[in-house]
Image (cartoon, rainbow, N blue to C red):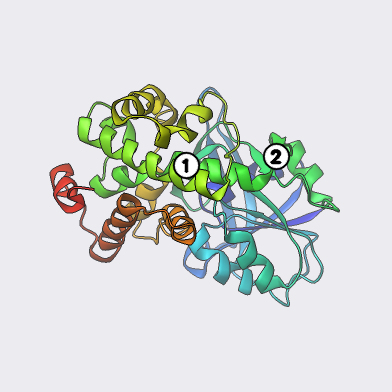
């Protein structure tokens, strides 16, 4: 099977490498700036407790033949442009879109004009260089309702663990919820694991998660269960007195540090001077809150601060974050 993996970032590197090691014919479709002169890219994946795995794969910036399967592995801000670059070049090849954005499938399907198979990478991955990534617990969740499932799903299942049980929308909303405190890490240029003992960071995390819990409850969203996480308690934060909500968040903070050796994705993007996913994660919750009349002042203000850093490239000390957030 001729599989094109779009994107050689953290997730694309893992998917392409593991597919190639499973015996599939894989080509990487990358941005011209990331195109190697030789037309081939050595990918490498480092995972704790495992030997490094690698592959040498063709890398192109434009397709010259129709693939059998396309796997989109780009961040949400790049979905529209990446999909538009495929129109007219992939024929009827099935498309699997792996992304975290609750609203992202509509973007891809609108550009292609046909259904896709949607999914999300449920492990943690850190970009090192084009084709090179560090990863913890790599796995996929795919839409269980996709009919017919493309033949490529079987190829993916041979390469890494694939789940097709919980509704994918619920999986994505769970990912969004657990990603919210990462914005604090992104603002101060410090992995979230290093902020575990900071009372202000813990309090702000509680505020963000409580706002989201209130929005989810009003919108009727039930985020999927996540191993090792008491999702039921996180969903009920908005019903708890502040002191108890803070205690729950502190108890559950280990879920935000399970990949302590990796840099949080929002911070990765800012360090690389790339657009972040703040609008498709935090912004998605804020937009949903607006639709249902639920205010999200902390999420909205934090998103504004991340955009400021995107524009200036200057991170903030935690005290400056406290001042900028004000009394919310």
Badge 1 crowding class, 10 Å Cα cut-off, few under 14, some 14 to 19, many 20 or more, is many
Among the 4 quarters of the image, the one containing residue 254 = top left
Q: Is residue 107 above or below residue 320?
A: below
Q: Position of residue 50 (x, y in %)?
A: 56, 25
Is residue 63 at all visible to an observer of this figure? no
Is residue 240 at all visible to an observer of this figure? yes
Q: Identify the residue at image location x=56%, y=64%.
A: 79
Secondary structure at badge 2 equals: helix
Q: Position of residue 105 (x, y in %)?
A: 64, 60
How many numbered circles are shown?
Answer: 2
Q: Is residue 235 above or below residue 176?
A: above
| Farthest-out residue, bottom | 88
Badge 2 crowding class, 10 Å Cα cut-off, few under 14, some 14 to 19, many 20 or more, is some
Q: Position of residue 259 (x, y in %)?
A: 44, 31
Q: Identify the residue at image location x=75%, y=38%.
A: 157
Taking depth in this image into account, of 296 and 141 the one nearest to the observer is 296
- First of labels 2, 1 by sequence position: 2
Horizontal side of residue 200 vs 216, given as left or right: left
The residue singled out by tag 1 in the image is 177
Q: Position of residue 154 (x, y in %)?
A: 81, 43
Q: Identify the residue at image location x=56%, y=27%.
A: 51
Q: Mark 2 or 1, which is nearer the eye?
A: 1
Using the numbered discs, state the Cα–Cα distance from disc 2 to disc 1 in whole angstroms. 33 Å
Taking depth in this image into account, of 286 and 239 the one nearest to the observer is 239
The residue singled out by tag 2 in the image is 21
């Amino acid at each position: 099977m001729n599989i094109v993996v779009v994107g050689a970032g953290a997730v694309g590197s893992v998917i392409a490498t593991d597919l190639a090691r499973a015996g599939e014919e894989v080509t990487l479709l990358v941005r011209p700036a990331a195109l190697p002169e030789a037309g081939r890219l050595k990918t490498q994946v480092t995972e704790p407790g495992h030997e490094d795995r690698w592959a040498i794969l063709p890398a192109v910036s434009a397709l010259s033949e129709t693939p059998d399967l396309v796997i989109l592995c780009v961040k949400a801000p790049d979905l529209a442009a990446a999909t538009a670059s495929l129109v007219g070049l992939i024929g009827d090849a099935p498309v699997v879109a792996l992304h975290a954005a609750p609203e992202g499938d509509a973007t891809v399907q609108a550009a292609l004009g046909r259904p896709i198979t949607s999914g999300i990478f449920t492990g943690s991955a850190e970009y090192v260089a084009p084709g090179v990534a560090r990863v913890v617990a790599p796995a996929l969740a795919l839409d269980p309702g996709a009919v017919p499932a493309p033949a490529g799903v079987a190829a993916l299942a041979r390469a890494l663990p694939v789940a097709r049980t919980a509704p994918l929308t619920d999986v994505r909303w769970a990912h969004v919820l657990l990603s919210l405190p990462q914005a604090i890490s992104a603002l101060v240029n410090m992995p979230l694991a290093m902020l575990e003992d900071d009372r202000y960071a813990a309090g702000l995390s509680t505020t963000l998660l409580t706002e989201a819990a209130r929005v989810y409850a009003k919108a009727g969203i039930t985020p999927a269960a996540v191993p090792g996480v008491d999702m039921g308690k996180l969903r009920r934060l908005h019903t708890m007195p502040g002191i108890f909500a803070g205690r729950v968040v502190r108890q559950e903070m280990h879920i935000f540090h399970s990949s302590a050796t990796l840099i949080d994705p929002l911070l990765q993007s800012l360090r690389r001077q790339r657009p972040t996913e703040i609008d498709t994660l935090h912004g998605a919750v804020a937009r949903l809150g607006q639709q249902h009349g639920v205010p999200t002042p902390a999420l909205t203000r934090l998103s504004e601060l991340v955009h400021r850093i995107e524009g200036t490239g200057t991170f903030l000390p935690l005290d400056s974050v406290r001042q900028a957030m004000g009394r919310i």
